[in-house]
Image (cartoon, rainbow, N blue to C red):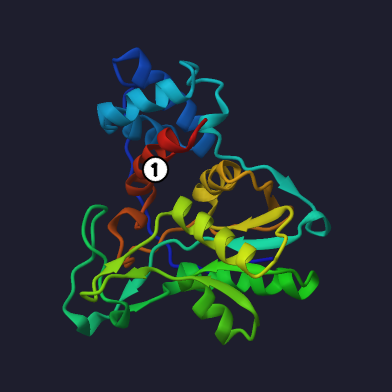
Amino acid sequence: MTTTTTTATVSTTTVPAPADPTRAALGERLADELGDVDVGRRVATDLEQGTLDRLVTAAGGDLAGSPVLDYEPTTAPLQQIDSIWAFSFGFRIDADAGIAPVGLMDPPPPMDVVSPGPVNAALAQIVADLVEDRPVPVVAQWEIARELVQLGVEDVISVEPEVAPDGSVVYLSTPAVAEEGLRIARSRGLDMGTAGVVCVADMAATCLLSMDRLDVPAVVPAGVELPDEYDPLSGQLWTRDVLSWIPVDLLGRGFLAR
């Protein structure tokens, strides 16, 4: 299976290992997991101290070997999967809306100026191909759900952002999407069984952690090539390139790990 996304190239140089031994250990682990020494070292050097401390605690002090820092997700054959869970990554803001891309702590843009973007379109195509081979219930974050409608995939549980009475949007985090998706599925009497997770490659292990916290067994469908490229025009700044994403991902892992 092939996917097409917009590529964001990250310029790297030969980065020295951090002097601090804890940061150096993190840099080595990330370099191994991500396949890029410079990215691993740059993230480890610049990571906020509070995030680093939480990661060390979550990893039981073992940054070199703890599964908390795994980036290679568990997989299983499609025939062993009972439902598909699709988590979005970024979105596009309409160019004529006059709204700047948002940072992690900024309020999301209004829903009427946002579209799924190329990464979520690629994820939706993967889901459509999977359910064609194995028709199972689908839970999808709204960006992917919109694309699935266009692809003719029916009966998708769409996890929508929350809209406050004043019209402001409350965008759900990945763990919140998983929790809300499970709530909706259970309200419909659906047994989701083993969840097959579809998301970008650098997010997969974190999505599995989110499902694990809900006591839902989860894997990535074996043989699926998850998108591993970033959208430089994403309306969420932290999803534009690997150096912006990994620190945010590590922040989440520190809270998710148990």
Task: Give left or right: position of 80 versus 145.
Answer: right
Residue in the image at 31% along x and 21% along y: 18
**Residue 226 percent coordinates (x, y):** 59, 57
The quarter of the image holding the N terminus is bottom right
Q: How many labels, in total?
A: 1
Of residue 161 and residue 144, the one placed in the foreground of this image is 161
Three-letter amino acid code at the position of disc 1: Ile
Q: Quadrant of residue 43?
A: top left
246 or 196, which lies in front?
196
The one nearer the camera, 144 or 13, is 144
Residue that appears at 37% across and 48% down:
245
| Figure quadrant of residue 182 | bottom right
Callout 1 crowding tier (Cα within 10 Å): few <14, some 14–19, many ≥20? many
Taking the image as shown, residue 78 lies to the left or right of residue 189, namely right
Q: Badge 1 is on which residue?
A: 246
On screen, residue 146 above or below 20: below
Which residue is pictured at 26% across the width and 76% down the height? Answer: 110
Residue 14 visible within the image = no
Left or right: 185 with respect to 57?
right
Q: Residue at x 50, y 79 (%)?
A: 146
Rendered location of residue 33, percent (x, y): 53, 34
Q: Residue 165: x, y in percent?
A: 25, 74
Q: Residue furthest left?
A: 98
The answer to whether residue 3 is left or right of residue 36 is: right
User: Looking at the picture, how far across and down is residue 72, in whole percent?
Assistant: 60, 40
Looking at the image, can residue 220 be seen? Answer: yes
Compared with 198, 203 (above or below) is above
Q: Is residue 117 above or below residue 112?
A: above
Of residues 11 and 181, the one drawn nearer to the viewer in this rendering: 181
From this viewpoint, which residue is outermost toward the top? 21
User: Which SS class for mark 1?
Assistant: helix
Image-quadrant location for residue 250:
top left
